[in-house]
Amino acid sequence: MLLFGQGQIGPEPFARPNEIGEDPVFHHQHLDASTQTGVGVFYLLIVLMNLGFAAYWFYNRRDRKQANIWIVVALVFLIHAAAYLFHAGWILPAFIRNAVDDFIGPVTYFMLSLVLFILFIYYRKGCTEPPVAWGILNISLLASGWAITDSNFRSIITKEDNVPIVLLIFSVGFFTWLGMRKAVVNDERMARGEPPLEKLEDEKVLVWPDLVYTELICMVIATFILVIWGVVLKAPLEQPATSAKAPNPSKAPWYFLGLQEMLVYYDPWMAGVVLPTMILVGLIAIPYIDFNQKGNGYYSFNERKVAIVTFNFGFIVLWVTLIVLGTFLRGPNWNFFGPFEYWDPHKVLPLNNVNLSDMFWLGLMGRVFEEGKDWFLRELPGIILVVLYMAALPPLLAKTVLKPFYVRMGFVRFFVLVTLIQFMAALPIKMVLRWTMNLKYIVYIPEYFFNI
Amino acid sequence: MSVGDYIRNSQVWKSIFRHPAPRDRRNRVVVMLTNVFLHLHPVSVRKSGIALSYTWCMGGLTFFLFLVETVTGVLLMFYYRPTLEHAYNDILALRDVTTLGVLRELHRWGAHAMVITIWLHMYRVFLTGSYKPPREFNWSVGVILLVLTLLLSFTGYLLPWDQLAIWAITVGSNMARASPFLGYEGPGATLLKVGDVSLIHSGSDARFLLLGGRFVSGDTLLRFYVLHCVAIPLAVAVLIAIHFWRVRKDGGISGAL
């Protein structure tokens, strides 16, 4: 019988097992045989996917040009597959990895995801064209294949509990494409005065067999995937619990890592309690504040622009990409690490963030406050800003830019909507203030644990 | 007479299925009405409403994964004891010794998958505007189900009692001590006092309620185990019943009006 603290069972928590003879910092790496075979099989599957896509264009759409393009793409992947199956040991060149690591940081990561999101929304028609979307998928698979040749990247991505996030990335990507594609098609139809596609098929069919068989097939496929997943990948089990030694980093379960990332910018009472509560209140409130009667029961973008952009911004940019950031790019001490960077627990980043009260009183007025005295006066500038943001902004918006909304929604709906959006915007606002002004707290009253 | 016909004409078979096989229109209607599981469905639906590219089947998969979690979870309860003495070793035994140890993998990966499918289900419902009248209330029920799903996953995360488990729960539950008014390090907590005695301290705040102690301990393990295996699944089951019932009552699966 095993007792607590006895022996080394399972891997060291969050240690980075590097292959023998590798220098994790300077990227002198090599690939072992089984990894190469795995990567080769991965490329072989992509070859098959592309051949299937080419066959679809050739036989179903009679489009030789498209078919040829995807055969060429398949050949590119076939070369990769052969290289790895014959263990050529190609590794992504160190200068590329270093360039990526140098470029990417919390700011560039967030701005990049935001820019890509805006581009996707703006060029939604082009982006969702099947060949374009397929090309994007191919590029992301190729990038994944290249990246996984780096041992630092590999050891994070293949951590058992991180595998669901790889699944999350690709499934959210796929369904974002699918939803937007159907919306674009419907929008074009409606612009021509035709009904949305869903409306064309509104004759009734019997649930047996049309629905119950679909459900059965879905259940069988889901069971199949789950069993394969369970047999291939062991559930993680680390050393027995001990309160004596905290792993570094200590991470919440992956679906809460977006919230944990918010801790960089807000104190626990905001990031861990108030903002999550507002997310849930906001989700529940959606049907009661969305007064737009259109777009009920079919995909459409043009009929519900504000609603879809807001929700997608919250779900994709603020939720999913922050989970990805928190999982793959946050290492020891919650420091930011590039995807190919070694998780060095001794990495030190200077923290030179300043409170607003210090900026105002010390920087502008040259006045120093005694510790624990006159906190109200000290924090007055920040308190005024927060009160103005929360209390004065909604009526101002109601009178000016958002007047049409206010008129159509009425008092209660409008103020609930604006308050929710203010809380949602609170995160990016604090991010930008942190990045541009090194702002730590807008209001800092440690006497009452009230820091914003 | 073939064996199949013999079975189908026996008294036992006919007592279970009170009508012929669903091969013609009449019996395809009757089968939906006479089976307690199938009658969750209507008899007929709009063709557009059941197209896989429209529904993504994510709500159905979430429910299916809930059933998978229930079955594998009940089986795992035979092997696992939620005490400091046994918890970790029982999981170790599931990994190394127990014949059906793969149940733990199914349970864990199924739980992760369920979190993803429930998000995608909400995403689909949002993109098709299916929360709009008359389905507002059912969307709210769905959000509560989302919260309960995350709590189910969160409470289950502690049970293996390894380093991954207790520190993830420590990080997560540390938030509770910062709750406004209810956590002893939350804003406003120092204001709640009678005379000089503060009501909210580390032995009486929200985190203490969650953990059953000042830190993650054996009491937490028991508390999370009961929540994970009994309390939350019961609440989820009730809400799923409401959710499905309201899908029917609010006009069936959504489609173009």
Image (cartoon, rainbow, N blue to C red):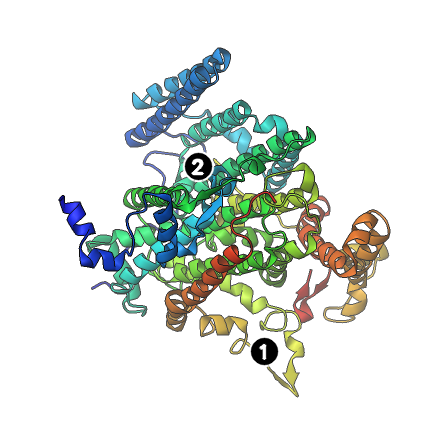
Q: Report the side of B148 relative to A421 (left or right).
A: left
Circle 2: residue type: Phe
Residue drawn 64% across and 43% down? A295
Of residues B45 and B129, the one nearer the viewer is B45
- Mark 1, secondary structure of its residue: loop
Work out whether residue B95 can be spotted: yes
Q: Report the side of A246 relative to A19 (left or right).
A: right
Q: In which quarter of the image is residue A198?
A: top right
Of residues B164 and A357, the one nearer the viewer is B164
Across and down, in percent, residue B17 comes to 27, 55
How dense is the environment of label 2, judged by Cα within 10 Å: few (below 14), some, or many (20 and up)? some
In what quadrant of the picture does the N terminus of chain A appear? bottom left
Of residues A260 and B151, the one nearer the viewer is B151
Q: Quadrant of residue A369?
A: bottom right
Work out whether residue B151 can be spotted: no
Across and down, in percent, residue A370 comes to 76, 68
Circle 1: residue type: Ile
Q: Which numbered dot is residue B200?
A: 1
Residue drawn 86% across and 49% down? A400
Across and down, in percent, residue A302 comes to 68, 37
Residue drawn 63% across and 31% down? A124
In what quadrant of the picture does the C terminus of chain A appear? bottom right
- Mark 2, secondary structure of its residue: helix
Q: In the image as oriented, which residue stretches furthest toward the bottom?
A: B195
Q: Residue beneath label 2, please?
A: A153
The answer for which chain carries disc 2 is A
Q: Distance between the residues labelled 2 and 1?
A: 45 Å
